[in-house]
Amino acid sequence: IPQKPQMFGHEQPIDEEKVARLACRSSGSKPAARLRWTKGNRELRDSGVEVVEDPNGKTFTVTSRVEFRVTKEDNEAEVTCTVEHESLQNSERSTTQKLQVHCMWRGTFWGGWGLRRPHPGPSVLTPVPSLSPQEFLWEKEGSDAPLQLSSDSVLIFPFLNKSDSGTYVCTATSSMGSVVAKYNLDVSGE
């Protein structure tokens, strides 16, 4: 009777569009068991199977590998390796691993920009990113030095005046890359 399968690979999150490589192993079967892969309710084709005779010379260890390119839809998807063998008599032994996928930026901000002026108080310029970045870099076009680098997406103008007019660039960066958004600010009046 084959042992419950053990699955190896990608216990850590994997980046979107990278190739996931998983292995599944079951030992103690005679004849050699068959391993079957599924992701959700879809069957996966293995990329190779290895059958090795156990040290006792009577049973076999079977190792199967599978590879596939992950997408954002694979986040939280369950990949299952199931042992099929005549000794199991219509029962299954399986192991499941849930995928964690880091998703890439799509290169845009949604939700737009907000320039609000709490009354009384400073004016605030903030983009609304589509994912949670780890760092925001604020710059003003034509200016040599960055205005702000922090984990906060908000740029605060303590006293807004005409000299603040211009194009502001926010670069939001996460482990998956960066996205840039611009905002044209036109200050009129005092």
Image (cartoon, helix red, strand yellow):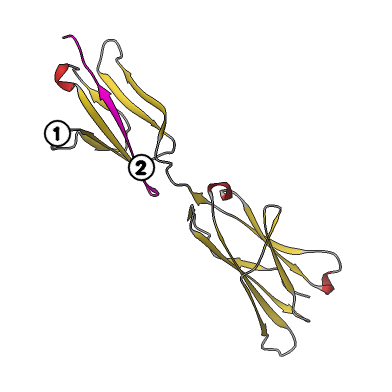
Rendered view: 27 above or below 155: below
Q: Nearer the viewer, residue 129 or 31?
A: 129
Please tell me which residue is depicted at 14% across the width and 20% down the height of the picture: 163
Name the quadrant of the C terminus. top left
Q: Is residue 180 magenta?
A: yes
Element assignment for label 1: loop
Q: Nearer the viewer, residue 6 or 111?
A: 111
Q: Earlier in the sequence, mark 1 or mark 2?
A: 2
* Residue highlighted by disc 1: 143
Please tell me which residue is depicted at 66% across the width and 88% down the height of the picture: 55
Magenta stretch: give its range: 174-190
* Residue highlighted by disc 2: 134
Rendered view: 190 above or below 145: above
- Position of 125 with respect to 64 (left or right) is left
Looking at the image, which residue sits at the far bottom? 57
x and y, in percent, of residue 49 in the image: 65, 76
Cα separation between marks 1 and 2: 24 Å
